[in-house]
Image (tube, grey):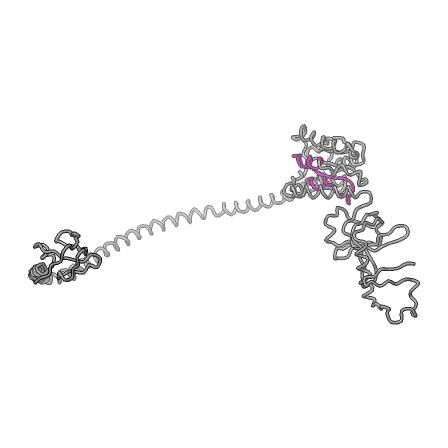
Amino acid sequence: MTALHLPNEFWIEDNALDDNDLPESRHVYSVSQLNSDIRLVIEDNFTPVWVEGEISTLRTPVSGHLYFTLKDERSQVKAVFFRRQQRPLSYKPKEGDRVLCGGRITLYEPRGEYQIIVSTLELQGLGELWRAFARLKEKLSREGLFAPERKKKIPLLPRTIGLITSASGAAVHDILQVIRRRFAGVEIIVVPVTVQGERAAVEIVAALELVERYWRDRIDTVILTRGGGSYEDLQPFNDERVARAIVACSIPLISAVGHEIDFTIADFVADLRAPTPSAAAELVIANYQEMSEGLHHLRQRLHQFGRYRIVQERRRLQLAASGLEYGRERLSFLRRDLFDLQTRFRTAMLSRLRLVRQKLRLCEFRLAQASPRLRLKPCFAKVYLSEQHLNQAMRHLLQSKRQRLTACRDRLNAASPLSVLARGYTVVEKAGTGKVVSSSADLTVGESLRLRFHQGQAWCRVEKVIEEE
């Protein structure tokens, strides 16, 4: 007996589908509702999943998403790899690849098809290598070892080339053949190393250090290369030690590892990446015939330009020679005109100067006659006399005011209570209130009094009150 558990808690058994047994209680799904419920069941029970298979019917639309079928010998399942999940991917998937996909299972409701939403994709058997490659690439990128401003410029025509590769591989023969064909006079120093296997990375680092130590002033460009191979064969060029040795090399370095579709860490840190060893030889050195033809063309242009300039300068010289005699006569004529103009200018200036001086004297005389000082001189005497009269009146008025002020001061001093105090009298005030006591009836025995004199004051207490009879 088989059964399918649905979210609405119904059990539908294959021996219980008789219409007579479920007359009114059967639940009818719409197609959309059924697909939605099945999608929930699948996502709850099959997430996450890892599926191994072969990529088939790979499609890459404009959106950048990857749609493909993952199959084995008997079955297949559809898969989608969205663009935002592809950023950590270090290679481009293609049909026929054996891969390991990690992700979640879901149901695409419009078509009722279930599929894998891929979040991780690894080549079968190389998953750990790819992860290590991605981690090292991200680490070196954060350190700035891939930055374009760090990389050195490759010389156009190096005198000596250092070639680090396998002495028995096809890469060394391809590079030597291309360089001899393009420019046979270049010196090549071959540093043989192992380019695959466990010791390859150590030998490559040692070769770079050897070149840096002994041939730094002799070698102009270094080519680090090997031919194509499997991904495992290229692993020495994904070694961190090799990458840092390339960065430490002060000589411009070209990396040419594998085929055009192969990318290694060495390609990213090198000053220039060549897709193949032959392409590296073409990049590192110019074609002798092309340079010879270019120099010949430049020489012809230089000769043509030189002949043109010679003709132009000769014509200018002839024109200058023919006009030299005319120029002498013209210069003599201009010199006579200049002397005549100088004489006339001097005479005119002296005459003009005399006329200006005469006008200046006349203006000075008229200004003296019209001076306001002459007209104001009689007024000065009147002003002086008025000033004397005013001063005398002011002194008389000031003397009168001073006498009145003195009389007022005397009267004020005579009426001042301070004058009375000065004659020996005292002002009696009650302590605390400051009220002046004018009669003994206002006093009580034991009361405190303040006595104010002409100079200073004193405190006293009433011992006995005597009233006037």
Q: Tell me which segment is drawn in magenta.
A: 241-270
- Residue extending farthest to the bottom is 24
The correct choice, above or below, for 20 with respect to 329 in the image is below
Q: Is residue 371 left or right of residue 287?
A: left
Quadrant for the C terminus, please: bottom left
**Quarter occupied by residue 405:** bottom left
The correct choice, above or below, for 139 with respect to 165 in the image is below
Q: Is residue 47 left or right of residue 358?
A: right
Q: Answer whether residue 255 is magenta in the image.
A: yes
The reply to whether residue 281 is in sight is: no
* Residue 88 in picture, x, y percent from top left: 73, 48
* Residue 75 in picture, x, y percent from top left: 89, 53
- Residue 16 vs residue 104, the one in the foreground: 16
Q: Answer whether residue 203 is magenta in the image.
A: no
* Residue 431 in picture, x, y percent from top left: 20, 56
**Quarter occupied by residue 168:** top right
Quadrant for the N terminus, please: bottom right
Q: Residue at x 16, y 52 (%)?
A: 458
The reply to whether residue 243 is in sight is: yes
Q: Is residue 206 left or right of residue 307?
A: right
* Number of numbered discs: 0
- Residue 268 vs residue 113, the one in the foreground: 113
**Quarter occupied by residue 110:** bottom right
* Residue 83 in picture, x, y percent from top left: 74, 54
- Residue 136 vs residue 398, the one in the foreground: 398
